[in-house]
Each structure stands twice: as C-alpha cells, then as structure tokens.
C-alpha cells in the first residue's frame, strides 16, 4: 500500500482547506495516478508543491515551484498530476 501526501511549503494539504467558502484544493487519484487541482488561486498558494509517495520500502518525492505572477482569469483552474511507480522488494 502506498501512502500519498501532497504538501505546500512542507505543510500537508488535506483537501479540506477553504478560502472564502470555496475549496482551495481537490485531491484525486485512480490506480497509480494522483492529482491535485487548484480551483481557486491566490497569492497565499505560491510556493513549493510536492507529492510524497511512501511504502514500506521507502519514499519518493517530486516537487515543483508554484509562482503567482500578476492576476489570473477568474475561474481558471490549475491541475497537477503525478504517476507513482511502485517499488517492491524481491
């Protein structure tokens, strides 16, 4: 079993974060594909977004910088995805 954790600036993203009554993040996943959607953006969401995949064998981290530059079109949605490769001991 793989445990998937998304973080923003090293703080876990639970999918329960709200800003002005709107969900800030939508977490999803099917099989080995895991997604993070950002339906409402703000300057507070700028920083290092990472996905951490852990299993009994070890941990893998993939990260990207999310920079907010200027304004964005109202209703614009950003989508991040990551395919997790399972590593198993033989």
Image (cartoon, helix red, strand yellow):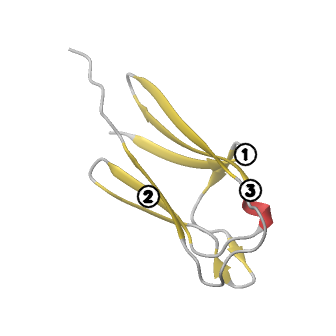
Q: Nearer the viewer, residue 8 or 63?
A: 63
Q: Which residue position is annotated with label 2?
A: 35
Looking at this view, is 46 or 36 the one in front?
A: 46
Q: Which residue is mark 1?
A: 9
**Residue 56 occupies quadrant:** top left
Query: 3 and 42: which one is in front?
Result: 42
Q: Position of residue 48 (x, y in %)?
A: 68, 45
**Image position of 45 with respect to 87: above or below:** below
- Separation of residues labelled 3 and 2 (CA atoms): 18 Å
Q: Is residue 13 above or below residue 1?
A: below
Classify residue 37 as left or right of residue 56: right
Task: Identify the residue at horizontal 71%, vertical 54% (top origin).
Answer: 67
61 vs 87, left or right, is right
Q: Secondary structure at mark 2?
A: strand
Spatial CA distance of label 2 from label 1 is: 18 Å
Report the mark closest to the observer, 3 or 2. 3
Q: Residue at x 68, y 71 (%)?
A: 41
- Sort mark 2 into few (<14), some (14-19) or many (20+) by Cα contacts within 10 Å: some
Q: Is residue 63 left or right of residue 72?
A: left
Q: Quadrant of the C terminus?
A: top left
The x and y percentages for residue 42 are 75, 70
- Judge the density around disc 1: few (<14), some (14-19), many (≥20) Cα neighbours within 10 Å: few
Residue position marked by numbered label 3 in the rendering: 46
């Amino acid at each position: 079993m793989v445990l998937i954790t998304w973080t923003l600036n090293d703080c876990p993203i639970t999918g329960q974060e709200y800003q002005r009554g709107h969900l800030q993040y939508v977490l999803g996943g099917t099989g080995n594909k895991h997604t993070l959607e950002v339906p409402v953006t703000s300057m507070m969401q700028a920083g290092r977004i990472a996905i951490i995949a852990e299993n009994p064998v070890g941990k893998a981290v993939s990260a990207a910088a999310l920079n907010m530059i200027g304004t964005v079109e109202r209703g614009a949605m950003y989508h991040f995805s990551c395919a997790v490769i399972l590593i198993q001991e033989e």
